[in-house]
Amino acid sequence: MDSPSSTPAPLVTHLIELRNRLLKAVLVILVLFVGLYTFANDLYLIVSEPLRLLLPSGSSLIATEVASPFLAPLKLTFAIAILISVPYTLFQAWSFIAPALYKNEKQIAIPLLISSIFLFYAGVLFAYFVVLPLIFSFFTTVGPGEVTVMTDINNYLNFVLKLFFAFGVTFEIPVATYLLIKAGVTNVAALSKKRPYIFLGCFVIGMLITPPDIFSQTLLAIPMFLLFELGLIAGRTVKVEPEETDEADQAA
């Protein structure tokens, strides 16, 4: 089995390498931001489409602050630049950590890295194509008929970005569950027994992240729990060492 280099590099060398990789990641974000800014208004129209399509006749998005028409698309463009740069940022993190890993650890880490990227984007897409239309369809129909829905563009953007990142991170649950099992912090049997508490915890997290209504909380909580179950399925592939099995039997 290959092992990391036996001669550790000086701390200063590691710090310099870390700084260089951080600078590369930031530079990529800035380049993406500059390239996307030309399409900032178009990007905002795309992101706001789930709400605009459901607005009643005569309603529209509004700007309640003088600088909002400029700042909202600017903020969105920067957020999209960060989202697009996630694979490159993770690659830089991987390149920094990889020399310290054993060969078998690298074989596990690479699939986890790829699946993390895939799951993050899947969470963002799920929020855009499924969650936002359902939430806005609910919000725009439950209000009094005499009330005209006119949402501020900056408030809308903050709400949408919060959901994007929340669902992106939430979809990492299978990877986090697998890593906890792989590291020996817990095991499939212990997590399976805690299902009722985890199910309740999903709703608590959904309550904290989403708008204060049971409809939005459920849209986050149910996928969270299903992703946890997916992590358990992946965790069953982890080989348990004999001594770990004996300890688990004694604890039982």
Image (spheres, rainbow, N blue to C red):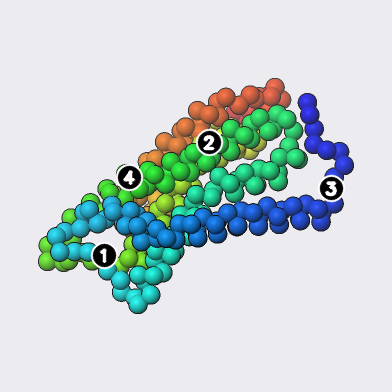
Q: Compared to 69, does 42 lie above or below?
A: above
Q: Position of residue 245 (x, y in %)?
A: 66, 24
Which of 19 and 102 lies nearest the eye of the viewer? 19
Secondary structure of the residue carrying tag 2 is helix
Residue 67 visible (yes or no) = yes
Q: Is residue 37 left or right of residue 110?
A: left
Q: Find residue 11 and report its horizontal and vertical position in percent.
A: 82, 54
Query: Residue 156 at x, y = what percent?
Result: 33, 62
- Whether residue 158 is visible here, answered yes or no, is no
Task: Answer few, some or many: residues within 10 Å of disc 2's Cα (few below 14, many 20 plus, some between 14 and 19).
Answer: some
First in residue order: circle 3 vs circle 4: 3
Measure the C-alpha gap from mark 1 to mark 3. 56 Å
- How packed mark 3 is, by other alpha carbons closer than 10 Å (few <14, some 14-19, many 20 or more), is few
Of the residues under marks 1 and 3, which one precedes in the sequence?
3
Q: Which residue is mark 2?
A: 115
> Tag 1, which secondary structure?
loop
Q: Is residue 6 above or below residue 168?
A: above
- Picture quadrant of residue 139: bottom left
Q: Which residue is mark 4?
A: 129
**Mark closest to the chain's N terminus, 2 or 1:** 1
Secondary structure, mark 4, is: helix
Q: Position of residue 246 (x, y in %)?
A: 68, 24
Label 4 is placed on what type of residue?
Phe
Q: Quadrant of residue 250?
A: top right
Give the residue type at disc 1. Answer: Leu
Please give the label number shown on residue 9: 3
Tell me which label, 4 or 1, sits earlier in the chain.
1
Q: Quadrant of the N terminus?
A: top right
Residue that lies at the very extreme toward the top in this rendered image: 242
Numbered tag placed on residue 61 in the rendering: 1
